[in-house]
Image (tube, coloured by chain):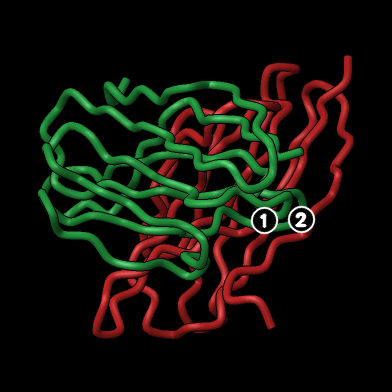
Amino acid sequence: DAGITQSPRHKVTETGTPVTLRCHQTENHRYMYWYRQDPGHGLRLIHYSYGVKDTDKGEVSDGYSVSRSKTEDFLLTLESATSSQTSVYFCAIRGTGDSYEQYFGPGTRLTVT
Amino acid sequence: RKEVEQDPGPFNVPEGATVAFNCTYSNSASQSFFWYRQDCRKEPKLLMSVYSSGNEDGRFTAQLNRASQYISLLIRDSKLSDSATYLCVVTLNTGGFKTIFGAGTRLFVKA
C-alpha cells in the first residue's frame, strides 16, 4: 500500500463547469503524476510534479492544470470541463531511489454531461 | 506505430493452463520494464519488474529480449483469480524521463 488516496472517487458534472481532483500521499514521495485512462488507450500522462511548485506537462495536458503547494497534495483542475474529459483519472507516485516503478491511487471516475 | 504494443486479447484459458503474453516496444533507448495487473474498475498494480536476465515470482516469469525489443509474461497453472488486464510498461530517458503504458491484454481464466 503506497498510501495514496484520491477524492472524489466519483463525480458527475456539467459541461463548462470547473472541476478539481485531489491526490494525497502520506509517504513524502517527490514525484507525483496524473493520468487518464480511456478504453483502447493505455494510461496517458496529463501532468506530473517533481517537487513542491515544480510541475510539467504530459502528452495530454490541454484543458488541464495542476498545482502542488505541499509535498503530500497534487491537484488536477479542469478549468471548463468538456465531454471529452469524461474518463477515469489516476494519480500515481514514483518509487524511491533508482526505481522507476509507479504506484497508483484508486482512481476518480469523472463523467461530464 | 504505438510506442508499446500489446495484443488486446481477450485470452480465454481454463484453470491450470499456461498462458503467455508478449509486448513490443519501439524505442531502443528504453531502460526499465514492468508488468502491471489491473482488475476491472481498479487501479493498476505492479506485478513485477522485468530484468535482462529474466526473473520469476512464483507462477509468473518475465523475460526481456532487448535485441528484438519485446518483453514477455508467462503465467503457469492459471487460477481464476488471475483474470485481469495485464499492462506492459516501459520507461526511457531521452533528455526527460518518460513512462509509456501499453493498452493491456485481457485474460479470463475459467473453471
- Report the amino acid beneath label 2: Gly
- Whether residues under marks 2 and 1 lie with C-beta atoms below 8 angstroms apart, the answer is yes
Q: In this view, does B110 lie above or below A84?
A: above
Position of residue A107 measured from the top left corner of the image (x, y, whole percent): 51, 30
Residue where numbered disc 2 is placed: A40
Figure quadrant of the N terminus of chain A: top left
Which mark is in front, 2 or 1? 2
Q: Residue at x 66, y 28 (%)?
A: A12
Tell me the colour chain B is drawn in: red
Residue that lies at the very extreme toward the front in this rendered image: A16
Q: Alpha carbon of mark 2 to alpha carbon of mark 1: how far?
A: 6 Å
Residue toward you, B56 or A102: A102
| A41 relative position to B14: left or right | left
Secondary element at image label 2: loop
Position of residue A3 measured from the top left corner of the image (x, y, whole percent): 27, 21
Residue where numbered disc 1 is placed: B103
Tell me the colour chain A is drawn in: green
| Image-quadrant location for residue A14 | top right
